[in-house]
Amino acid sequence: MLRHTFVHLPGLGPSTEKRLWAAGIHTWDDFLDAKTPPLGSVKVPMWRDELAASKERLAAGDADYFGVRLPPAENWRLFFDFREHLACVDIETDGTPKNEVTAVSLYDGIDTVRTYAHGKNLHDFADDILEKKVLVTFNGRCFDAPVLKSHLGATLPKAHIDLRNVLTGIGIKGGLKKCELHYGVDRGDLTGADGYFAVVLWREYVKTADPALMETLLAYNAADVLALPVLLAHAVNDLLEQTPFADRYRLDIPRPGVNPHVPDPRVLRRLAWAFSRK
């Protein structure tokens, strides 16, 4: 989709992009090869230069270049060219104003989930994230990313698909669990658990050092990232319907990946009250 994208150009918005598509200017090359300017604008020469630079940066695999130029709700367009370089990320914190990080999950969107726990391997995340090019989160621009930068010193990709921005753009609002429910994502034994449940798990773990509590916390956190590619695929397909390219790029909806952690039934029974807290 990036090669069909023009909204990353300075001063060119969605309505102008749609005019280009309607005029048969579907790709960067179409624009660059046009014998007459496809738009009556003094910015056309600048846009030609920007598109030539865009071709170079895409060939170089520079996701950050596009991440800082695309509007936040349009970063989904990065998916097709960088699907093998995704970092689906979610964090849990201690529920205090300090936002001490208790757990982090990192999923490549395909088959590998890495989890990080406070007091164990938490700071390994800052090294592992450097391997990735596109960050995928839910509400991460407002919460996860700033906390990871300030608390773990992590250098995150500038290319960031925040699904809260993307889904809001197609009229699907609410928290992660509500969006999962909209698309039929099943969390199994963790259905009904929310962020407060994760806070309770951490506080109980601090008191008891019971490894079953940490295992359940990591299972809950991993479930968050495993759902992100499912929501992303649904959102991308919905957004493609607003373009001339839906038939070319429509995605199969993946199943959530395998959770490397298993919530402890004993813990779930004991803390069931936290599931229903509103």
Image: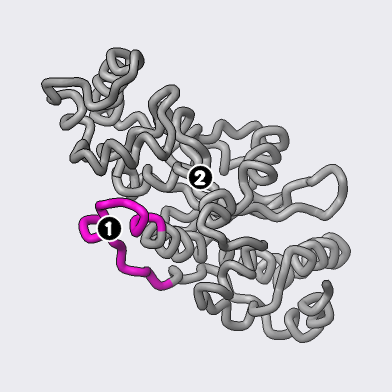
- Per the picture, the main secondary structure of the magenta-coloured stretch is loop
Q: Is residue 177 magenta?
A: no
Position of residue 190 relative to residue 211, above or below, is below
| Residue beneath the point at 83% across and 72% down | 278
| Residue beneath the point at 62% across and 61% down | 173
**Residue situated furthest front in the rendering:** 40
Residue 276 percent coordinates (x, y): 79, 79
The disc at residue 246 is 1
Residue 183 percent coordinates (x, y): 50, 73
Residue 98 percent coordinates (x, y): 84, 42
- Mark 1: few/some/many CA within 10 Å (<14, 14-19, 20+): some
| Range of residues picked out in magenta | 239-255
Q: Amino acid at mark 2?
A: Ala
Whichever of callouts 2 and 1 sits on the residue coming sooner in the sequence is 2
Left or right placement of residue 62 versus residue 147 in this view: left
The disc at residue 73 is 2
Residue 40 percent coordinates (x, y): 29, 21
Left or right placement of residue 278 versus residue 83 in this view: right
Quarter where residue 29 is shown? top left
